[in-house]
Amino acid sequence: MSSLDRLAEFELDVLKEVGNIGSGNAATALSTLLNKPVDMAVPKVSLVPFEEVAERVGGAEELVMAVFLRVEGEAPGNLFYIMHPVSAKRLLSRLAAMEVEEDLEYSEMELSALGEIGNILAGSYLSSLADFTKLNLSPSVPAIALDMAGAILSYGLMQYGEMGDAALLIETKFMDNGEQLDGQFFLIPDPESFNTIFQALGVRQP
Amino acid sequence: MIQQNVVKVGMADLNVAYRGESIRTTGLGSCVGLTLYDSDRKIGGMAHVMLPDSSISREDSFNRAKYADTALPLLIEELEKAGARVNRLSAKMAGGAQMFAALVKSDSLRIGPRNVEKCVQMLASYGIPIVGEDTGGSYGRTIELDSETGILYIRSVQQGTKEL
């Protein structure tokens, strides 16, 4: 894992700030869409063993709604916005004024609307990150899936597979008092991207 | 599908089950769940393979269960220790999905199909027949092998449970 398991405390703090700025902006976007405040937990940055990654959202078999974007540009990586399926339904009824049934069936229209909401949130996460680091970062077209957490999140870990059995996650949780529109952002920069990020923020020499 | 003793296999991990135990791995996406079974001794083994080929490894010492080309020999070793014989083994496998198929542009992201291809190739090199396969698609799977019967149960969100 070369240097990733030996990141200095201040480097972890820098990554927390990266998560904070990205998700802070996304929380503002969500709050504007919902016209109500959205709370955000302090980001967690940690090197997580593959085995435990899915535990962060309730286990490998937990059914989740995920919006995935591949981050392209100078610091490539994977970005997930993960929601509980019930939260996803509530989000739809609030935002798209859609009549939704609280079951697990999603129509094409509902999936498309969720993809677009995820796209707005992830887009605001990334654009603030790009502003902050002055790096060129662009999102791929969003992909959406309702499936087992393990199957979904493992997709974002492949770049780490060839160098170890753990991945560095920058994780932020959204909370919404009472109404349970909870969601979780996972930014998983490619291993090679950390040096670029640290250099861009002036905490490492080129 | 509910057994008293279930041996768990994590991601990039492998294990062996016998004496009526089941062996199980959860949330397979592009990873492949490769199972081997000796019906004579009722011994089963399972590997949760993450990547096709260990030649890409950049680690000094790597986890052999992670790569298809090193997981199969290791799984066979473990099964032999438990009393299985390689010439009696048959294989079943599941997984190797393309979770976000729409996004895949480059070959390096086609991990699922490449994992499956490598497993097929490795099994052929050991002369182990593949008697059941449920691979591909764009959905996750949880699998469980019953060491008593050799039946592989495959569960997915959209398609329920099927047996191989």
Image (spheres, coloured by chain):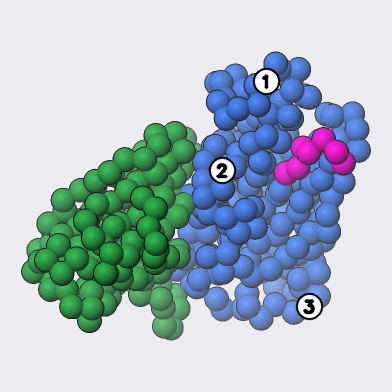
The reply to whether dot 1 and dot 2 touch (C-beta < 8 Å) is: no
Q: Chain B hue?
A: green
- The image quadrant of residue A1 is bottom right
| Amino acid carrying mark 1 in the image | Val
Disc number for residue A9: 3
**Seen in the image, is A87 located left or right of residue A104?**
right
Q: Which residue is mark 2?
A: A63
Can you see residue A137? yes
**Seen in the image, is A203 located left or right of residue A110?**
right
Residue span colored magenta:
A177-183
Of labels 1 and 2, earlier in sequence is 2
Decide whether residue A178 is among the magenta residues.
yes
Q: Position of residue B97 (x, y in %)?
A: 38, 45
| Amino acid carrying mark 2 in the image | Leu
Give neighbour class at mark 1: few <14, some 14-19, many 20+ (Cα, 10 Å): some
Of labels 3 and 1, earlier in sequence is 3
Q: CA distance from mark 3 to mark 1?
A: 46 Å
For the stretch drawn in magenta, the main secondary structure is: loop
Instruction: Identify the element where label 3 is drawn.
Output: helix
Disc number for residue A100: 1
Q: CA distance from mark 1 to mark 2?
A: 18 Å
Give neighbour class at mark 2: few <14, some 14-19, many 20+ (Cα, 10 Å): many
Q: Position of residue A179 (x, y in %)?
A: 82, 35
Give neighbour class at mark 3: few <14, some 14-19, many 20+ (Cα, 10 Å): few
Instruction: Identify the element where label 1 is drawn.
Output: loop
Q: Give A165 or A196, whichever is nearer the viewer.
A: A165
Chain ID at mark 3:
A
**Chain identifier matching the blue colour in the rendered picture:** A
**Seen in the image, is B8 located left or right of residue A128?**
left
Chain ID at mark 2:
A
Decide whether residue A189 is among the magenta residues.
no
Q: Residue at x 55, y 21 (%)?
A: A108
